[in-house]
Amino acid sequence: MIFETKEDINAPLERVFPYIADFAGFERSALRRGAEVKRLDTLNSPGPGMKWDLKFLLRGKRREFRLEMAQYDPPNGMRFHTTTIGVDGVMHVDLIALSRTSTRMNIKLEMQANNLTGRLLLQSLKIAKSSIAGRVNTKLYEFARGTEERLRSA
């Protein structure tokens, strides 16, 4: 199963990347939303090998995920591997300069079931795909507008 979305940000690529690489900020945001976040690595700077254990509610059930950064390519993007019971995934976050003052952020999540539990989870996600996609698109839009606002006031 694949989820893809994109959003344009009215800011230069080099200024947008630090906002998508603000891992401490994303950790705080997840904690505020009720997730449990535990950083597993001891790296001092962002890069491959960063790992987190995440626990949160998804589709009415408590889910546990492991997220590991596989590729870190500033200012172009990142790739993460995710694992949970029955499902493995790869998430690509790519930035593309559309002009000197505009950047497109592409996010692609590919998930694959590796047992019956995973197939059932993915089936429930497929049924709700348009609803989930709408919420993800809204959050990405809000992130893009917030990034533009922070860069204007910086």
Image: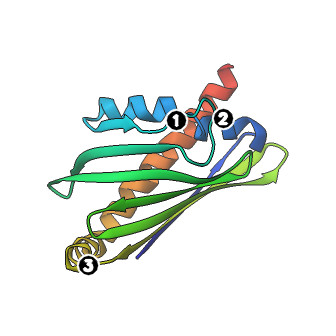
Vertical relation: 43 (above or below) 98: above
- The disc placed on residue 18 is 2
Query: What residue lies at 15% left-to-right and 55% top-to-bottom?
Result: 61
Residue 143: x %, y % from top left: 51, 40
Q: Is residue 13 left or right of residue 136?
A: right
Split into 4 quadrants, where in the image is the N terminus? bottom left
Q: Amino acid at mark 2?
A: Pro
Few, some or many residues within 10 Å of mark 3 (<14, 14–19, 20+)? few
Q: Amino acid at mark 1?
A: Phe
Residue 81: x %, y % from top left: 48, 59
Q: CB under 8 Å between callouts 2 and 1?
A: no
Q: Give the residue number, with chain letter if any, for mark 3.
A: 115
Circle 2 sits in a helix, a strand or a loop, which is it?
A: helix
Q: Is residue 54 left or right of residue 103?
A: left
Q: Nearer the viewer, mark 2 or mark 1?
A: 1
How far apart marks 3 and 2 lie (CA) works out to 37 Å
Vertical relation: 154 (above or below) 63: above
How far apart marks 2 and 1 lie (CA) works out to 10 Å
Return the residue found at the far left: 60
Q: Earlier in the sequence, mark 2 or mark 1?
A: 2
Q: Amino acid at mark 3?
A: Asn
Circle 1 sits in a helix, a strand or a loop, which is it?
A: helix
Depth check, front residue: 51 or 138: 51
